């Protein structure tokens, strides 16, 4: 049976990663299946269990760790854990499906190290840190302290870029989607 390939996409927050992934999936040119992660954070409005995430209690998440259910997991925010489930990734790959992982920078680097040539890791980045700050300000959802914190975290996350196979700058959304699509098609058609 053919083995599926793994696409990892990571980005500092505010770089438009979710918008790019949604546009990519909507275009339907790439043959990808989304790996639904597990998290112990509560669902946000509009999120569905089993679709957006597998929403677990703290105890369920701990149990999943002890049962070795994760390929990788990270504490992405204090007390908030996110993990790639073996049942999502490895079973899909074994069925020959190409799997998309939308995970944080540490998890992304870990998955690339684990799967080598079977994985292609893509880093989405803003044109500059100043531009990211402007975008967060114009979104109007965070106060200035929260923006400073996000920008600080983004600077740390940007330091992971060299450990990714390839980067996409999200300056113009359509071009960023085109670029990401090309990278994925090149890799999955090989
Ligand atoms: P949010 O809470 O906004 O949905 O996601 C927060 C962050 O967690 C995002 O950067 C997302 O990429 C990351 N994330 C989601 N699932 C996983 C996962 O399974 N593993 C890791 N390491 N990070 C994840």
Image: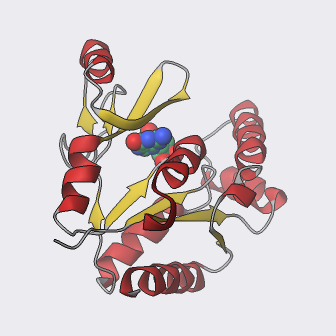
Residue 93: percent from left, percent from top: 25, 61
- Residue at 19%, 40% in the rendered image: 49
The quarter of the image holding the N terminus is bottom left
The relative height of residue 150 versus residue 66 in the rendered view (above or below) is: below
Q: Position of residue 173 (x, y in %)?
A: 57, 78
Q: Residue at x 30, y 69 (%)?
A: 98
Q: Residue furthest front?
A: 1
Location of residue 135 in the rendering, given as x and y in whole percent from the top left corner = 69, 58
In the image shown, does 65 or 148 lie closer to the viewer?
Answer: 65
- In the image, residue 2 above or below residue 179: above
State which quarter of the image contains the C terminus. Answer: bottom left
Answer with the quadrant where ligand 1 appears in the image: top left
Residue shown at the point (43%, 54%) measured from the top left: 102
Give the camera-side residue of 144 and 36: 36
Query: Where is residue 106 shown, x and y percent of the image?
Result: 59, 41
Residue 56 found in image quarter: top left
Q: Nearer the viewer, residue 32 or 135?
A: 32
């Amino acid at each position: 049976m053919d083995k599926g390939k793994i696409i990892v996409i990571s980005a500092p927050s505010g770089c438009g990663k979710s918008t790019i992934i949604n546009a990519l999936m909507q275009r339907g040119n790439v043959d990808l299946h989304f790996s639904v992660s597990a998290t112990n954070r509560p669902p946000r409005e509009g999120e569905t269990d089993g679709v957006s995430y597998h929403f677990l209690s703290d105890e369920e998440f701990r149990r999943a760790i002890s049962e070795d259910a994760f390929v990788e997991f990270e504490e992405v925010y204090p007390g908030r854990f996110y993990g790639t489930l073996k049942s999502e990734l490895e079973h899909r790959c074994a069925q020959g499906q190409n799997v998309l992982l939308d995970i944080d920078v540490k998890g992304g680097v870990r998955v690339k190290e684990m799967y080598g040539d079977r994985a292609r890791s893509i880093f989405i980045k803003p044109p500059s840190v100043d531009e990211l700050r402007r975008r967060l300000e114009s979104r109007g959802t965070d106060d200035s302290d929260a923006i400073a914190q996000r920008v600080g975290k983004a600077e740390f996350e940007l330091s992971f870029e060299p450990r990714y196979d390839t980067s996409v700058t999200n300056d113009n959304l359509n071009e960023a989607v085109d670029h990401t699509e090309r990278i994925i098609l090149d890799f999955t058609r090989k």
